[in-house]
Amino acid sequence: MNTLVRHQKRSSVVPVLARTLSDRRVQRAKSNNSSLSFRVSLLSTMSEPEGNANDGAAIHPTIGAIRSMRKSLGPATRVGFVPTMGALHEGHLSLARAALEENDIVIASIFVNPTQFGEGEDLDRYPRQLEKDVKLLSEVGVSHVFTPSADSMYKKNHVTYVDPCGFDNTMEGISRPGFFRGVATVVTKLFNIVQPTSAYFGQKDAVQCALIKRITEDLDMDINIKIMDTVREDDGLAMSSRNAYLSEEERRRAPIVYTSLMAAREVFDSRLSRGVETVSADDLREVVEGVLETEPLVTEVQYVAIDDTTTMQPISDVGDGGCVISLACVVGSVRLIDNIVLR
């Protein structure tokens, strides 16, 4: 029999962030990055900052290098920016292609940000494939790749973080305390360093997308935030760097995640087509959970959230304004997230 662990309720108390964990994670990242720094140096000698498309993407391993390149561009140059943590897949590359269509030049970053990983999470084993990633970005036409180290992004006496109110009380925030503080901080730093015209993100990380829109609006950043549709495998599984953790059997079963979301969409569309004005969020949540319960390899459903499309705060009924249905669950031993937007 399948033993399913559920964590559904949204706490009314914002989790207290363990500030000292950030220091520990940064120190671990610095240790991990030391093994990468030599490879970055070798790569950077292969492609000068002024390299053209025939030479591949120019690699900038320091903040000073990417800033120098950015300052060399004319004031009217439209700069597209695709921030990543590496281990690139077609989802990332689709963001780069979208940026290339709308901008004069595209910059991507590859940085595994330690401050968005919690204690016991996969910072140490997160996939790192720098050479392959740079090659992929070069092939789609990205001009410049920023590859900073943890030492340069979080210097010895770093004490300043961007701590967005309310996001730790979302379902994803409750599951990963401190995650959104880490994301808000690194995205703000990257925006300050790169100074893009537009930045591109995938809808798969729904709450993160809402957070980044909030940051740019609240802090008056003159940056266009472009949210692109989730890119999926042929069987519906959302593309993710962490899919590499799935065993063959887990990979075969993982599409149940998307199937559960589409079952909720079918219920929503069916009821509205019959003239029902609103659909209960509880009904939609039960549909998703019911489908997930049919899969023995889904051992834990951390949450199924029905949220407002703008604020990512919970709603009780869904009408013409739609909602975001997002979930996190464990398939075998791998945590997967996904979402769909109902309109």
Image: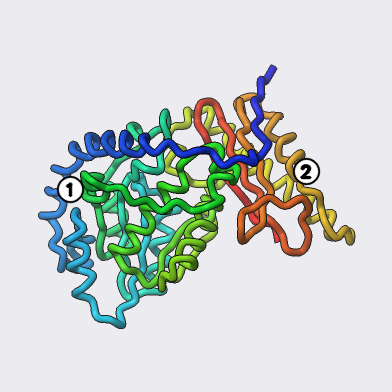
Give the labeled residue for mark 2.
282
Residue that appears at 43% across and 32% down? 245
Q: Most extreme residue toward the right, as rendered? A: 275
Of circles 2 and 1, the one toward us is 2
Residue type, mark 2 in image: Asp
The quadrant where residue 59 appears: bottom left
Residue that appears at 64% across and 25% down? 5
Give the labeled residue for mark 1.
40
Q: Is residue 284 above or below residue 209?
A: above
Residue that appears at 80% across and 44% down? 283
The answer to whether mark 2 and mark 1 are in CB contact below 8 A is no
Residue that appears at 15% across and 68% down? 50
Secondary structure type for disc 2: helix
Along the viewing direction, whichever of 220 and 331 lies nearer the viewer: 220
The colour scheme is rainbow
Residue type, mark 1 in image: Val
Secondary structure type for disc 1: helix
Q: Most extreme residue toward the top, as rendered? A: 1
Where, quadrant-wise, is the N terminus in this rendering? Answer: top right
The percent coordinates of residue 215 (x first, y second) are 46, 61
Few, some or many residues within 10 Å of mark 2 (<14, 14–19, 20+): some
The percent coordinates of residue 304 (x first, y second) are 66, 41
**Residue 123 vs residue 7: left or right?**
left
Q: Is residue 131 visible?
A: no
